Image (spheres, helix red, strand yellow):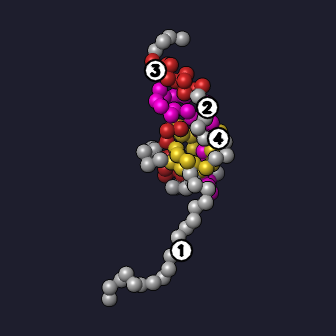
């Protein structure tokens, strides 16, 4: 293989250990592609697999397959597009008070 700096980055990304283990909970970053965020519907995702063909010579280019909660379709993304997510997502209780509304 040639000593191209881009090829060396791809090989390094392929050989790197995955940052997120299989079964861990992740979310999409704000800088992720909007198509991925729409498919995930702003829900946390579970990492199904990591590894595969590296397509970009960027930092964090290791490919992942994630499954959003409540979905049956997996999303293919890169390590740079996801971040660690929270397991317990508590929803705030909404009260039916009208103290804010001026009459």
Q: Which residue is mark 1?
A: 93
User: Residue 15, position in %: x, y?
Assistant: 60, 25
Read off the residue under disc 3.
6
Labels 3 and 1: the sequence-earlier one: 3
Q: Counting other residues with Cα less than 10 Å from the Cα at mark 1, is it few (<14), some (14-19), or many (20 or more)?
A: few
Q: Quadrant of the image for the C terminus?
A: bottom left
Residue 3 at what x, y percent from top left? 48, 12
Magenta segment main secondary structure: loop
* Residue found at the far top of this picture: 2
Magenta-drawn segment? 50-71
Query: Mark 3 and mark 4: span between their CA atoms?
Result: 26 Å
- Is residue 6 at all visible to an observer of this figure? yes
Task: For the N terminus, give its image quadrant.
Answer: top right
State the separation of the CA atoms marked 2 and 3: 19 Å
- Which of pointers 3 and 4 indicates the residue nearer the eye? 4
Residue at the spot x=49%, y=50% of the render?
37
Distance between the alpha carbons at the discs numbered 2 and 4: 9 Å
**Sequence order check: which comes first, mark 1 or mark 4?**
4
Badge 2 element: loop
* Residue occupying image coordinates x 63% and y 44%: 47
- Indicate whether 18 appears above or below 94: above
Dot 2 surroundings within 10 Å: few (below 14), some, or many (20 or more)?
Answer: few
* 70, above or below 84, in the image: below
Residue 78 horizontal side relative to residue 22, left or right? left
């Amino acid at each position: 293989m040639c000593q191209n700096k881009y090829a060396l980055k791809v090989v390094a990304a392929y050989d790197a250990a995955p940052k997120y283990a299989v079964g861990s909970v992740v979310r999409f970053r704000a800088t992720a592609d909007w198509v991925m965020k729409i498919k995930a519907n702003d829900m946390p995702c579970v990492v199904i697999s990591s590894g595969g063909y590296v397509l970009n010579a960027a930092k964090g280019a290791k490919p992942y397959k994630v499954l959003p909660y409540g979905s049956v379709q997996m999303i293919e993304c890169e390590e740079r597009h996801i971040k660690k997510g929270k397991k317990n997502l508590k929803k705030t209780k909404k009260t039916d008070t009208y103290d804010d509304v001026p009459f």
